[in-house]
Amino acid sequence: MADRGNRGFSPPVDIYEHLGVKTFINARGAHTRFGGAIMLAAVVDAMVAASKSSVHLGELQDAIGARIAAMTQNEAAVVTGGAAAGIVLAISACIPAV
């Protein structure tokens, strides 16, 4: 697939200043309401590399779950869109099928 570039979009130097949102020093750690955690450069690089291709999300979810399960020595794993989604899936797994 050809690289379509950024279609002329150039983010402001400081996106938060541009939006009028105050930044702060987070001394509490990774909390979702405080913006999560600042990502390592290697994570951002991996996201940029992944953003250059399209994949079937179900296949990606299965592959990543299998890899995390192997790394953590568990029989299965799943990546969710956040803590609330993880809690919903965990509770759902405990409900017997009818």
Image: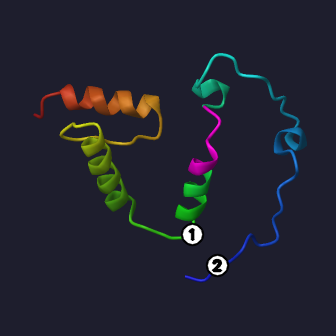
* Label whose residue precedes the other's in the sequence (2 or 1): 2
Q: Kindly identify the amino acid type of the residue bearing the numbered disc 1.
A: Lys
Q: Kindly identify the amino acid type of the residue bearing the numbered disc 2.
A: Asp
Question: Residue 2: horizontal and vertical position, in percent?
Answer: 60, 83
**Is 61 included in the stretch rendered in magenta?**
no
**Is 39 included in the stretch rendered in magenta?**
yes
In-front residue for pair 48/60? 48
User: Where, by quadrant of the figure, is residue 39 drawn?
Assistant: top right
Residue drawn at the location 25% of the way across and 31% of the way down: 92
Question: Residue 20: horizontal and vertical position, in percent?
Answer: 88, 36
In-front residue for pair 50/19? 50
Question: Residue 18: horizontal and vertical position, in percent?
Answer: 89, 44
Q: Say which quadrant the N terminus sits in.
A: bottom right
Name the residue beneath numbered marker 2: 3
Within 10 angstroms of label 1, few (less than 14), some, or many (20 or more) residues?
A: few
Residue drawn at the location 57% of the way across and 69% of the way down: 52
Residue drawn at the location 86% of the way across and 45% of the way down: 14
User: Which stretch appears magenta?
Assistant: 37-43
- Farthest left residue? 98
User: Where, by quadrant of the figure, is residue 58 drawn?
Assistant: bottom left
Question: Residue 88: horizontal and vertical position, in percent?
Answer: 35, 30
> Is mark 2 in CB contact (under 8 Å) with mark 1?
yes
Name the residue beneath numbered marker 1: 52
In-front residue for pair 70/20? 70
Residue 52 against residue 76 in the figure, above or below: below
Within 10 angstroms of label 2, few (less than 14), some, or many (20 or more) residues?
A: few
